[in-house]
């Protein structure tokens, strides 16, 4: 990538160290659009907050903590599958593969993939794309541990980051989209987003998708309502963020976390429930919002998948499934796909 292209695309370039660059859009996904977005989604009769606003510094830290609570099996299960399949995954990768990660967050699982690449590559390039600032922080640790690694972090939405991919050189990309983050999209939009990813993929690119599998509602509801209350704090933190960034006056003790499994839609739905009739001012959004007692504000969907459904989605996106790996209890799946089906290196 030339710095000129990055600038033409509207990115500001921050050189944080010789091996770490971060790109940030000039019109950052910042206060103004947060205000505009919540004014819109809290303005109607059916209220919601987009989960992308969860991830300020506090929210990102809380999500990191969720990944360690015993009920939230997703992260540990995915990591254990990744460490088990390392060599096999490596056999699909060309030796000059660049790792691109969508929604990299704290980059903890990234290491498992970099370990695979390190075994077969001399130089390694990592391109994380994340809306949160924690991206830069987590990258410093990676540089220390991987001396041959170069990182270009893109602090942007998935869409912005994917556009950027098409400006890169011809090296094959392994696009990692882990943690069942695809499940956050609304029904239909996840499928569209897969198509969008596929449309940005070259013939030699591969996609590694981590998806949570459908299972008993009790297990799912516990994963999204842990007994330590970390998920509750994570959910309610978006109100704290509005208080701080938008001058709102949410009384945190008057709202509660809720998580429900919707079996027919195959998804966990998270809500914030108003425990009283109350009015809240959100000055930066120019809004005054009335909440009724018991009213639910929808904050997140986490879709759950079945193997046949995954195969179908991948096929409809115009991709082929090269491998599917699961844990022994079939809680979670890692799916490797590509345009034509990749021959393995032998
Ligand atoms: C990061 C979107 C995959 O849906 O499981 C965790 C976010 N929300 N606990 C998920 C989340 C509540 C997580 N994703």
Image (cartoon, rainbow, N blue to C red):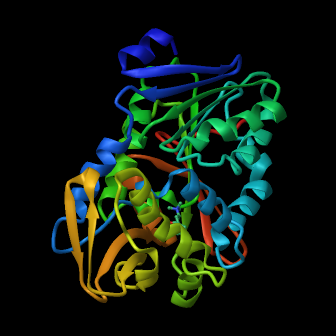
Residue 87 position (above or below residue 14): below
Residue 289 position (above or below residue 192): below
- Visible residue check, residue 165: no
Looking at this view, is 94 or 45 the one in front? 45
Identified at 20% across, 65% down, the residue is: 288
Looking at this view, is 285 or 62 the one in front? 285
Identified at 21% across, 75% down, the residue is: 290
Q: How many marks?
A: 0
Identified at 32% across, 75% down, the residue is: 297
Q: Is residue 260 left or right of residue 173?
A: left
Where residue 186 appears, x then y in whole percent?
33, 63
Residue 248 position (above or below residue 34): below
- Visible residue check, residue 329: yes
Looking at this view, is 30 or 108 the one in front? 30
Q: Is residue 120 left or right of residue 6?
A: right
Identified at 77% across, 27% down, the residue is: 121
Q: Is residue 25 left or right of residue 149?
A: left
Where residue 83 appears, x then y in whole percent?
78, 55
Where residue 144 appears, x then y in whole percent?
82, 32
Where residue 169 appears, x then y in whole percent?
52, 17
Looking at this view, is 294 or 173 the one in front? 294
Say which quadrant the C terminus sits in.
top right
């Amino acid at each position: 990538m030339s710095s000129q292209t990055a600038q033409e695309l509207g990115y500001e370039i921050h050189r944080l160290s010789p091996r770490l660059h971060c790109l940030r859009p000039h019109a950052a996904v910042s206060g103004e659009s947060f205000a505009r977005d919540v004014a819109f989604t809290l303005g109607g009769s059916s209220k919601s907050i987009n989960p992308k606003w969860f991830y300020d510094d506090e929210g990102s830290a809380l999500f990191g903590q969720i990944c360690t609570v015993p009920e939230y099996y997703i992260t540990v299960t995915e990591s254990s599958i990744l460490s088990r399949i390392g060599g096999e995954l490596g056999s699909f990768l060309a030796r000059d593969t660049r790792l691109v990660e969508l929604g990299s967050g704290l980059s903890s699982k990234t290491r498992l993939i970099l370990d695979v690449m390190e075994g077969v590559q001399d130089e390694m390039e990592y391109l994380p794309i994340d809306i949160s600032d924690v991206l830069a922080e987590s990258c410093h640790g990676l540089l220390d541990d991987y001396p041959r690694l170069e990182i270009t972090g893109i602090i942007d939405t998935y869409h912005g980051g994917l556009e950027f991919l098409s400006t890169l050189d011809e090296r094959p990309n392994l696009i990692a989209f882990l943690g069942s983050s695809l499940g956050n999209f609304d029904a239909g939009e996840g499928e569209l987003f897969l198509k969008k990813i596929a449309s940005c993929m070259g013939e030699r690119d591969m996609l590694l998708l981590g998806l949570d599998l459908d299972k008993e509602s009790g297990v799912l509801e516990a994963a999204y309502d842990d007994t330590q209350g970390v998920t509750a704090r994570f959910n309610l933190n978006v109100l704290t963020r509005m208080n701080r960034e938008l001058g709102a006056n949410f009384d945190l003790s008057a709202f509660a976390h809720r998580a429900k499994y919707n079996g027919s839609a195959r998804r966990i739905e998270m809500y914030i429930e108003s425990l009283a009739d109350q009015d809240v001012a959100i000055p930066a959004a120019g809004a005054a919002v009335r909440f009724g007692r018991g009213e639910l504000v929808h904050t997140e969907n986490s879709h759950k998948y079945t193997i046949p459904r995954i195969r179908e989605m991948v096929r409809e996106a115009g991709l082929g499934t090269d491998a599917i790996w699961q844990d022994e209890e079939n809680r979670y799946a890692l799916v490797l796909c590509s345009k034509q089906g990749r021959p393995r290196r032998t």
